[in-house]
Image (cartoon, rainbow, N blue to C red):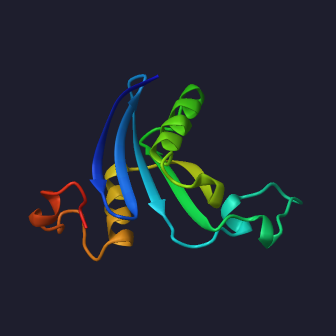
Amino acid sequence: MIEYFTRILRFTHAEVWDVRCASSDYRVFLADENRPAEAADLRLPAGMSMESDELRDNLLTVSIYSNRPVQESHIGSLDQFAKQLTDHVALAHCEVVTTFYTGDTEQALQQFVENHTSSTYEGLPIEQLRHLNQN
């Protein structure tokens, strides 16, 4: 059901994609947190717990933003898209946590770049933007 997708940014530890699914637009933020997963990262149901030896060695987070609430019928397609982005990773050693948010996608992009670089989106040097990898 994905109609269109394009990568906006690619860092060594993070990527940003714009995705159109059945005429709805989403922005997908993928980040390698480069740390072991913790039980709190998994947002387990109340009363459920995991032992630390059950958690995987690395945490990958996928945050999907839309200006409107995600449509239930799009969740499966967006989840599959996120899994394809992480397919090259040794997933047996990684927790991949996907979360959906409703909010301003441009503001989310600004915050993501500031959190994962020492710059703002507008402040990224043109020299970085000429390469496949923006680092």
| Residue 104 showing in the rendered view | yes
| x then y, percent, for residue 6 | 29, 39
Q: How many marks?
A: 0
The residue furthest bottom is: 118
The quarter of the image holding the C terminus is bottom left
Residue at left 25%, top 59%? 133
Residue at left 68%, top 64%? 56
Residue at left 53%, top 42%? 83
Which is nearer the eye, 99 or 55?
A: 55
Residue 18, image quadrant: top left
| x then y, percent, for residue 99 | 57, 50
Which is nearer the eye, 58 or 120?
A: 58
| x then y, percent, for residue 32 | 48, 63
Residue 86 vertical placement versus 126 (above, below): above
Residue 66, image quadrant: top left
| x then y, percent, for residue 77 | 52, 30
Side of 61 where 41 appears, left or right: right
The residue furthest right is: 47
Which is nearer the eye, 95 or 20?
A: 95
Side of 120 where 33 appears, left or right: right
| Residue 108 showing in the rendered view | no
